[in-house]
Image: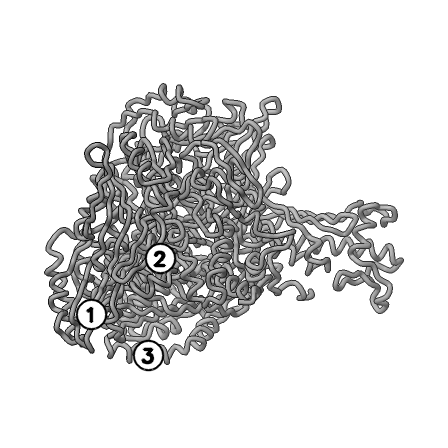
């Protein structure tokens, strides 16, 4: 394989439309006769609906229809959960598209208005009168499991959505014989994903044909099609889902929501195209959240700092209903990663999924793995304090030694490849770690609090083998598909089942084709996000698009190369065994002037005037690629902070990220993913968090109160990499979309706690607001 | 978001504005709209009518005479931040203007709209109180005669989102004394990370003779419903050399000035705001005095 | 109310409700959907356009406010099919990922460079205070702004 294109940071091919305002996102779509829906949402976290009066709204100017739960009942089936983790007693409670009797969170749909324009629809919403009997609410997942908690669902006693246990080794023995045990309670606060594009759906119903089209801001159009079929009853082959330009997702556009089902319902009832776009304040309650764990964790170790056991009981808030992939996140994607990059012989995870009166919880960038990494890295820092060791030293004593092809961790996963020590050393060298520690000592003597946070991580991505998906209860496969099609002119379309929305695969996939087949990258156009145009695929999340989808692209390209080679042999009148491929040309071994370009081959295959006997016309290949294993990127991140003891203000002064995602197709794109991921994780550590009051009202209900990372509050992220290819991936790639978020939250957190270490501070709740830090310094509550 | 319906009147003079206010019950004035439009969109404000005064030329611009900076209330934050004259004769105003919100808010938001809205977390009320600004207000008296009155900053701001402006009055000018060469100023603020509004802020104007503080004006914002003059701090500063110890001691006096209501929210409690008020005061004094930070 | 607004050099006349936001006028009346709506509260800057040469958040501005003004949206920045230097720099430096905040970012940087042709990285970061990007971590946007300054001869 040449490396001309692979590995080069060419600028992105999707950008020209994005920098000129010519891209089409869902809310930009305007169909003839289109009307507008607005959804009335419950203002209460928990209430019984006594009655609804929609008459005034129905009579308001411009209003075409008002529908309530009674209208959709029996027409739209409840929204299903698609990840029913086995052996966990998952309670698949009914999630009606529009609540009829009980609302269970602020944001639950109560009615929908369709009007000629959006302003009219919003005006009419105010005219709907709902008589609620307000019920007590519960938000804290541990409390929700308690004896006196309000009950959300009759068929989920104690609000328990599921109970999942995973273990390896013998944890109880490890703790019995432990020389040292450290304990902590960790709160992973609820986060609001805040993709910049609010969610939106446009539905169009072609009644004479029975065809439903939905333009949808989603990360996985094929899954939306599948579930739309289950909910609406429209057969799958009559449904077309189009994910046009999608403005970020971060997990919040995985779920198949009630809202697009409501929009489809309205379009089918009215026979008109209907658009719904959420406002940002609506997004904060209606679009899924992330994290929301309370974790009780214990770590056992020897006095020399060798970790012997880890056990955790986790209360994972699911929100009021199970979102599409909700249960899989705190279990499969979390508990199974408790070994991180370390050799830990005995591990147990005990995870309770719990219903609470809040917005459902879904994947949010990293999904389970940031929580696992945080848990582990927190406990290791606590162990270092307990043993009075440098936190780096404790990590070094426990890292799994370098391996190239498979390592079994106690909890049951087989990691693909890793060189964790090298990543750690690279980060330490780059930051002059020992000098940083000296500087810290000096500053402390002058009353200045500097802190250093070091995180070693390993994560699971490239989801994943379908057999495993089935075994862990995922309601679909996790393979990917790619069709590579050459036209007579030598130009290429690649049709993929993945659905990138900012990650740059229109470029990186074209680079794969250019590299495998020697065509100019500009001769390749990647098509995605339309179920009528693209082959089945499971979507873009879990850092799987390049790993699994890219592999499918590469394998299709290789099939084309082989067909091209056979056709070239025929045209060159050479023995098949004598024809080789290099740099876009097929040539007879030893006679490089006797050759055919890939373009020659594409032309001949498409006109088919002179084909070998039995060879089909056309130059096109399809691959359904099911990976043999997951991939396991890793790295070391180091954060440096200065804490102002007077007011608790934190200044993040340095951030170094060393990541190993295997081979890099486009280093510029890889770096961009790391920048964005790191900053998102810094957000969790320092600024972000959904805050509810006792009644279940979201107090951080807009960007005025929910603080997102801003440019002026951040330093540059210094990125470095090591390269340990995945042994089983056809491209040697591992995935990079989530590593930044996975590593940066504990890196910054550990740095802040490290800055306060001399004061005896061992932990604080995130986000680390100045007040919390100040209180820790001044020991006031 | 989508505002509820309202009537809209664009006016071209103060007289017309007053007349329109009188004619429409519940009408509200709007300049740049940066305080009002977000509330309209959330349907938290529902005025029957809006009187758009953004086109009144008389209410725009900055002029400076020997004693006073005259600022039209429709002057944008950006105009003030970029004004060389303001930077020369009242650098605190330039500093504060450049700290407000973000570039777009500064481009469109006006000083008059800001002070009329009187958000306790915004910057102008604090700074203008420290500068002893005067607010010129026009209203309608008997027989529909125009009446002009002038109110000191200390009396203009009456509480959270509340001023001494009457329902049928309009702010027509803000007058700020020109600072002399012995005067030094600074504004320090702990900003909310989402809005950049102040959690705690301190505006300081001090006169110095050598290293000695001869006069001081210290005002706190963000933590109380209206700006709080830190008289105890002022008293502690006057007559003292600005040494690190003296500054710290003076700043610590601020607790005496915060006996009244201090606000708290989910980001920062009242207790915390009280506790860090001296820190912002100290930062501002250091900055004003041109001293290196401790 | 009848208003007339010049957008990217073309005049649009329409009878609008006073409550209509400028961003809705641009997107729904003028059909220029390059300007985005990202929040409701003036925090995110996705809706930034140039009004009479200065950046404004078009979600915090009524359409009637824009009566008689001249607006430049992202669609109007490239001239004669040639990208503006800021657009080019965003492309070269990977200053965007999902693209949703990009129009606001590009217009904000354009104004920033008009006011300060040779900014430092720190000044650029300060200048981006009113714009939220969730994808890039801002770093490549800062690089793009500095590269554009260079290209524009700042």
Kind of element beneath mark 2? helix
Count of marks overlaid on the render: 3
Rendering quarter of residue A771: bottom left
Horizontal side, residue A89 vs residue A481: left or right: left
Q: Chain of mark 1?
A: B
Q: CA distance from mark 3 to mark 2?
A: 42 Å
| Colour convention of the picture | one colour
Q: Earlier in the sequence, mark 2 or mark 1?
A: 2
Q: CA distance from mark 3 to mark 1?
A: 39 Å
Give B68 or A734, whichever is nearer the viewer: B68
Quadrant location of the N terminus of chain A? Answer: bottom right
Q: Position of residue B279 (x, y in %)?
A: 21, 65
Give the residue displayed 38% in from the left and 46% down from the top: B57
Quadrant location of the C terminus of chain A? Answer: bottom left
Q: Which mark is residue B80?
A: 2
Q: Chain of mark 3?
A: A
Q: Position of residue C83 (x, y in %)?
A: 61, 55
Q: How many residues crowd mark 2 within 10 Å: few (<14), some (14–19), many (20+)? A: many
Q: Position of residue A257 (x, y in %)?
A: 44, 37
Q: Are marks 3 and 2 on the same chain?
A: no
Q: Look at mark 1 in the image and give the residue it sits on.
A: B207
Q: Chain of mark 2?
A: B
Q: Look at mark 3 in the image and give the residue it sits on.
A: A439
Give A97 or C31, whichever is nearer the viewer: C31
Q: Are marks 3 and 1 on the same chain?
A: no
Kind of element beneath mark 1? strand
């Amino acid at each position: 394989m040449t490396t001309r294109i692979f590995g080069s940071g060419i600028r992105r091919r999707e950008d020209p439309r994005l920098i000129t305002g010519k891209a089409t996102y869902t809310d930009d779509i305007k169909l003839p006769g289109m009307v507008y829906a607005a959804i009335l949402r419950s203002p209460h976290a928990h209430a019984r609906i006594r009655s609804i009066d929609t008459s005034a709204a129905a009579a308001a100017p411009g209003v075409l229809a008002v529908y309530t739960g009674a209208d959709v009942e029996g027409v739209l089936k409840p929204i299903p959960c698609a990840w029913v983790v086995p052996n966990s007693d998952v309670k698949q409670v009914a999630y009606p598209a529009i609540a009829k009797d009980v609302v269970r969170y602020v944001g639950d749909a109560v009615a929908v208005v369709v009007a000629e324009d959006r302003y009219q629809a919003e005006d009419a919403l105010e005219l709907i009168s709902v008589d609620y009997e307000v019920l007590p609410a519960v938000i804290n997942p541990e409390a929700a499991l308690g004896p006196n908690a309000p009950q959300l669902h009759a068929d989920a006693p104690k609000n328990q959505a599921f109970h999942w246990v995973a273990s390896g080794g013998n944890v109880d023995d490890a703790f019995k014989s432990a020389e040292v045990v450290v304990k902590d309670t960790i709160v992973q606060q609820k986060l609001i994903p805040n993709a910049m594009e609010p969610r939106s759906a446009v539905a169009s119903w072609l009644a004479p044909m029975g065809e439903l089209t939905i333009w949808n801001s989603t990360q996985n159009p094929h899954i939306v099609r599948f579930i739309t079929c289950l909910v609406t009853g429209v057969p799958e082959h009559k449904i077309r889902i189009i994910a046009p330009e999608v403005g970020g997702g971060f997990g919040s556009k995985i779920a198949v929501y009630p809202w697009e089902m409501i929009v489809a319902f309205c379009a089918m009832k009215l026979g008109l195209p209907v658009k719904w776009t959420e406002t940002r304040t609506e997004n904060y309650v209606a679009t899924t959240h992330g994290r929301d764990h309370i974790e009780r964790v214990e770590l056992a170790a020897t006095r020399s700092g060798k970790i012997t056991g880890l056990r955790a009981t986790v209360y994972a808030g699911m929100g009021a209903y199970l979102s599409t992939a909700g249960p899989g996140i705190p279990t499969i994607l979390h508990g199974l990663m408790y070994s991180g990059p370390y050799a830990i012989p005995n591990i147990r995870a005990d995870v309770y999924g719990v219903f609470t009166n809040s917005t459902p919880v879904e994947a949010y960038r990293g999904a389970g793995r940031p929580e696992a990494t945080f848990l582990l890295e927190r406990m290791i820092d606590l162990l270092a304090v307990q043993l009075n060791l440098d936190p780096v030293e404790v990590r070094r004593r426990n890292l799994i030694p370098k391996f190239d092809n498979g390592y079994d961790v106690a909890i049951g996963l087989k990691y693909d490849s890793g060189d964790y020590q090298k990543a750690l050393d690279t980060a330490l060298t780059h930051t002059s770690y020992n000098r940083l520690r000296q500087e810290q000592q000096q500053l402390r003597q002058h009353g200045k609090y500097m802190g250093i946070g070091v995180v070693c991580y390993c994560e699971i991505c490239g989801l994943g083998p379908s057999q495993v998906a089935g075994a862990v209860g995922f309601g679909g496969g996790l393979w990917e598909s790619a069709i590579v099609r050459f036209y007579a002119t030598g130009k290429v379309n690649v049709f993929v089942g993945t659905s990138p929305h900012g990650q740059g695969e229109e470029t990186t996939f074209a680079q794969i084709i250019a590299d495998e087949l020697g065509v100019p990258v500009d001769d390749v156009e990647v098509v995605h996000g339309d179920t009528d145009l693209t082959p089945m695929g499971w979507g873009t999340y879990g850092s799987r698009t390049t790993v699994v989808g890219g592999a499918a692209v590469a394998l299709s390209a290789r099939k084309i190369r082989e067909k091209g080679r056979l056709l070239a042999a025929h045209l060159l009148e050479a023995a098949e065994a004598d024809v080789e491929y290099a740099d876009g040309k097929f040539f007879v071994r030893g006679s490089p002037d006797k050759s055919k370009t890939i373009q020659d081959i594409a032309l001949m295959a498409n006109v088919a005037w002179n084909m070998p006997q039995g060879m089909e016309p056309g130059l096109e290949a399809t691959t359904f690629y099911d990976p043999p294993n997951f991939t396991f990127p890793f790295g070391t991140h180091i954060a440096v902070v200065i804490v102002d003891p007077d007011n608790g203000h934190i200044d993040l002064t340095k951030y170094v990220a060393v990541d190993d995602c295997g081979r890099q197709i486009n280093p510029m794109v890889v770096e961009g993913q790391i920048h964005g991921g790191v900053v998102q994780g810094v957000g969790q550590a320092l600024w972000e968090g959904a805050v509810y009051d006792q009644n279940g009202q979201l107090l951080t209900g807009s960007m005025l109160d929910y603080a997102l990372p801003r440019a002026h509050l951040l330093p540059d992220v210094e990125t470095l990499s090591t390269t340990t290819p995945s042994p089983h991936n056809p491209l040697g790639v591992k995935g990079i979309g989530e590593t930044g978020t996975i590593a940066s939250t504990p890196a910054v957190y550990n740095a802040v706690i490290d800055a306060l270490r001399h004061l005896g501070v061992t932990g604080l709740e995130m986000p680390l607001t100045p007040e919390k830090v100040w209180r820790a310094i001044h020991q006031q509550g | 978001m989508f505002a509820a319906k309202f009537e809209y009147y664009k006016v071209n003079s103060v007289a017309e504005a007053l007349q329109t206010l009188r004619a429409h019950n519940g009408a509200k004035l709007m300049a740049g709209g940066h305080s009002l439009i977000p509330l309209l969109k959330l349907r938290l404000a529902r005025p029957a009518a809006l009187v758009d005064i953004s086109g009144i030329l008389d209410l725009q611009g900055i002029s400076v005479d020997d004693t006073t900076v005259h600022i039209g209330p429709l002057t944008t934050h950006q105009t003030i931040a970029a004004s060389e004259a303001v930077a020369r004769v009242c650098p605190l105003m330039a500093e504060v203007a450049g700290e407000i919100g973000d570039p777009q808010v500064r481009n469109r938001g006006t000083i008059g709209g800001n002070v009329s809205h009187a958000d306790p977390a915004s910057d102008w009320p604090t700074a203008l109180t420290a500068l002893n600004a005067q607010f010129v207000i026009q209203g309608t008296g008997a027989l529909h005669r125009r009446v002009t009155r002038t109110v000191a900053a200390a009396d203009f701001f009456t509480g959270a989102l509340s001023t001494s402006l009457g329902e049928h009055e309009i702010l027509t000018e803000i007058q700020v004394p020109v600072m002399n060469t012995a005067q030094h100023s600074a504004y320090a603020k702990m900003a909310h990370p989402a809005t950049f509004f102040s959690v705690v802020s301190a505006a300081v104007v001090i006169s110095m003779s050598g290293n000695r503080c001869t006069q001081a004006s210290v005002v706190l914002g963000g933590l109380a419903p209206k700006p709080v003059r830190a008289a105890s701090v002022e008293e502690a500063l006057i007559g003292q050399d600005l040494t690190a110890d003296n500054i710290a001691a003076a700043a610590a006096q601020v607790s005496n000035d915060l006996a009244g209501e201090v606000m708290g929210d989910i980001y920062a409690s009242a207790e915390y705001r009280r506790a860090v008020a001296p820190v912002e005061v100290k930062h501002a004094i250091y900055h004003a005095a041109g001293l290196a930070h401790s | 109310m009848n208003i007339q607004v010049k957008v990217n050099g073309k005049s649009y006349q329409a009878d609008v409700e006073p409550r209509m936001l400028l961003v809705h006028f641009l997107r729904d009346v003028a059909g220029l959907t390059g300007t985005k709506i990202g929040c409701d509260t003036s925090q995110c800057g996705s809706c930034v356009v140039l009004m009479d040469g200065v950046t404004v958040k078009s979600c915090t501005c009524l359409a009637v406010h824009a009566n008689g003004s001249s607006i430049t949206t992202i669609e109007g920045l490239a001239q004669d099919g040639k990208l503006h230097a800021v657009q080019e720099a965003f492309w070269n430096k990977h200053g965007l990922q999902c693209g949703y905040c990009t129009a606001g970012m590009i217009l904000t940087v354009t104004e920033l460079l008009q006011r300060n042709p040779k900014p430092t990285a720190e000044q650029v970061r300060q200048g981006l205070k009113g714009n939220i990007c969730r994808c890039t971590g801002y770093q490549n946007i800062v690089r793009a702004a500095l590269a554009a300054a260079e290209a524009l001869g700042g």
